[in-house]
Amino acid sequence: MRGPTQAAGHGGDGEEMKKQQSPETVVAQAAGHVEAASRGLAPGIFPATTYERDPDMSLPGGAVYSRDDNPGFDVAEEMLCRLERGAEAMLFASGMAAAASLFKALRHGDRVILPRVMYFALQVWVEGFAERFGLRVELVGNDAADYIAALSREPARLVWVETPSNPLWTVTDIAAVAQACKACGATLTVDNTVPTPVLTRPLELGADIVMHSATKALNGHSDVLAGALVTGNADDPLWQGAKEERRLAGAVIGPFEAWLLARGMRTLFVRMERAMQNAAALAEWLVTRDDVAAVLYPGLPDHPGHAVAARQMVGGFGTMLSIRTGGGEARARAVKGQLQLFRRATSLGGVESLVEHRRTVEGPTSQAPDDLLRLSVGIEALEDLRADLAQALSATAWNETSEKDGE
């Protein structure tokens, strides 16, 4: 559980220099970490589960037990804490474990507000958990006005925002929701998995806690399961409750996974830049095609949330987009089946491009239209990605005019 001034590093005026470093430098140099014993520039892996005490039972190394602490957690927590401009960060075994720790820290009868369109598995889990443990859950639209209206009716203990939302990529004005939360004492948590702190820093927009499925873009290589929370106030009772949940329930990341996460984060900015360039170019190209019914991407000027996204997603609009193929589920499945380079797999934010028919994955209560395909755009050559989509769309002929004529 590292704060932004605790990482090992160079001496001298290091603390002042750290405050002036750009986020690209922070991650590229692993937050200035140098191994104390070897002076190695690559962080180490620390598999120890327990740590020796001095004869007086003090802990000269600071760590007690690996369910509580591990030196291998420090680097990734420090990097993420500084990227999000937070006071403290915690790593978890998965994004779901990170999110769940906050809901488990709530009390019977607490009111929770969730967006209607969000990561489906978390919504399902929260609703089931709430039913068993007495939380009151309200689902609202993803627009800030929907949150504000819900909070004006009755205060909430925890408000959850995911923006852009998965898989429709609707945009929520974080600052507007944060203002409403502060007025009634609600804790605002923002799922920042998709934009990452490369684009959006919710704490600076007024949020209290940020959640990441670090499995996705933070790691970026589809080879580690990890989650994280970052807070702007380490004394927040809900944060303290989540910390206790991690410590006692054991939802902690492993030392090797923490090492993989820190390694992946060192290339976060260059990966995101390349993938965002690809995603933007594909969205602009797809919207011109007659055989695509709609393109859902906040970077398009006619996207309903474009203005808000441009204000709170600094430097780009992310690596995720969805297309509506037209022709219902049958055509969406046909297009997905024809793709050769886009891999048919669940997840997002990796270096490889993925495609998924979300309604199939989420089931009949899904908010995704039956003709929607979600694309996670990677860092491959743009011309190859475009060629793959072109051949798949062309092989499953459809156009909007013919569908309307058929009606």
Image: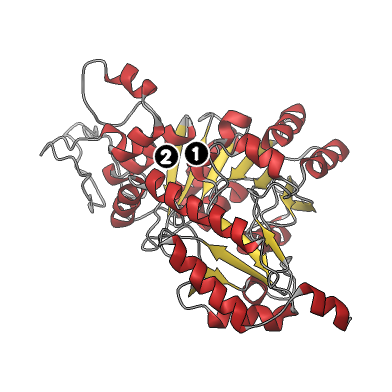
Q: Residues within 10 Å of mark 1 (few under 14, many from 20)?
A: many
Give x and y (percent) for residue 259: 29, 51
Give x and y (percent) for residue 316: 55, 43
Question: At x 48% / y 67%, what residue is drawn?
Answer: 385
Q: Residues within 10 Å of mark 2 (few under 14, many from 20)?
A: many
Question: At x 71% / y 67%, what residue is drawn?
Answer: 368
Horizontally, is 205 left or right of 405 in the view?
left
The residue wearing badge 2 is 80
Question: At x 67% / y 61%, what residue is drawn?
Answer: 295
The residue lying toward the viewer, choosing from 35 and 244, is 35
Do the numbered discs 1 and 2 sit on residues whose CB atoms are within 8 Å? yes
Horizontally, is 220 left or right of 207 in the view?
left
Q: Quadrant of the N terminus?
A: top left
User: Image quarter for residue 41?
Assistant: top left
- The residues bearing labels 1 and 2 have C-alpha atoms spaced at a distance of 8 Å
Say what amino acid the circle numbered 2 marks: Leu
Say what amino acid the circle numbered 1 marks: Val
Question: At x 46% / y 54%, what residue is drawn?
Answer: 275
Q: Secondary structure at mark 2?
A: helix
Give x and y (percent) for residue 294: 72, 64
Horizontally, is 188 left or right of 55 in the view?
right
Which tag, 1 or 2, sits closer to the chain's start?
2
The residue wearing badge 1 is 230
Report the coloring of the rendering.
secondary structure
Question: Is residue 158 visible in this depiction of the protein?
Answer: no
Question: Is residue 332 visible in this depiction of the protein?
Answer: yes
Q: Quadrant of the C terminus?
A: bottom right
